[in-house]
Amino acid sequence: MAIKNQKFGVLGVYLGALSANKLIGCAKSISLDATIEELETSCRASGGAKEFEPGDIDYTASAEGGMRVATGSDAASNITYENLLDMAMNRSLVTLTFGGSEPGDPRWTASAFITKVGLAASQGQQGTFNTSFRITGDLNKSLVPTP
């Protein structure tokens, strides 16, 4: 089996069923981080070397991109910087999807809330946004189905 480069083009935020998936519009970069707590288990019998065991796992995700206004049919299928700020102010719990978009690509889904939305602009230039999510609970992995 060949190894291929993985292209992650989907960071979706949606409420309700997966069929209602709305992408974060104009996201230029996305990230998903897993951090495992390190529990030190060293004792006198360790002989001076530190020993550790894995503890709880913590997940975060983020996206950044250009600020755009979605109108018409785009408004129905995209999450904009304005929607992200509204969700943060409402402390909305959302379902987050991260992964590829080609059949067979891995895709992870989890419940999350927004911990940060940043907006920046320079006069005469397109503004940018960045947002961070705290994932609550486990990530659920699936594969993008073949149509």
Image (cartoon, rainbow, N blue to C red):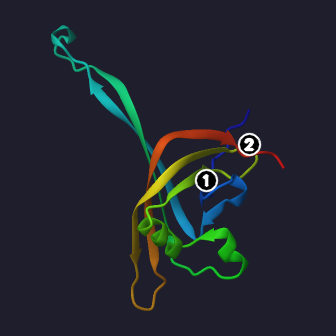
Extreme residue toward the bottom, this view = 124
Q: In front here: 96 or 9?
A: 96
Write down the residue under mark 2: 104
Q: Amino acid at mark 2?
A: Gly
Relative to residue 118, is residue 70 drawn left or right? right
Disc assigned to residue 100 = none
Whether residue 31 is visible here, answered yes or no, is yes
Relative to residue 8, is residue 102 drawn left or right? right
Q: In front here: 98 or 112?
A: 112
Give the alpha-carbon distance from disc 1 to disc 2, as whole Å.
12 Å
Q: In front here: 115 or 42?
A: 115
Look at 22% across and 21% down and name the residue there.
50
Relative to residue 73, is residue 118 drawn left or right? left
Q: Residue 141, how many percent across, how many down?
A: 62, 39
**Quadrant hosting residue 140:** top right
Relative to residue 48, is residue 82 drawn left or right? right
Mark 1 residue crowding within 10 angstroms, few (<14) / some (14–19) / many (20+): some
Look at 68% across and 69% down and name the residue there.
77
Q: Residue 6, how many percent across, how many down?
A: 63, 47
Q: Earlier in the sequence, mark 1 or mark 2?
A: 1
Whether residue 66 is visible here, answered yes or no, is no
Disc assigned to residue 8 = 1
Above or below, comparing residue 113 to residue 130 in the picture: above
Q: Residue 10, how many percent across, how many down?
A: 62, 57
Q: Amino acid at mark 1?
A: Phe
Look at 53% across and 49% down and name the residue there.
111
Q: In front here: 110 or 142?
A: 110
Look at 59% across and 46% down and name the residue there.
109
Badges 1 and 2: C-beta atoms under 8 Å apart?
A: no
Extreme residue toward the top, this view = 45
The N terminus appears in which quarter of the rendering? Answer: top right
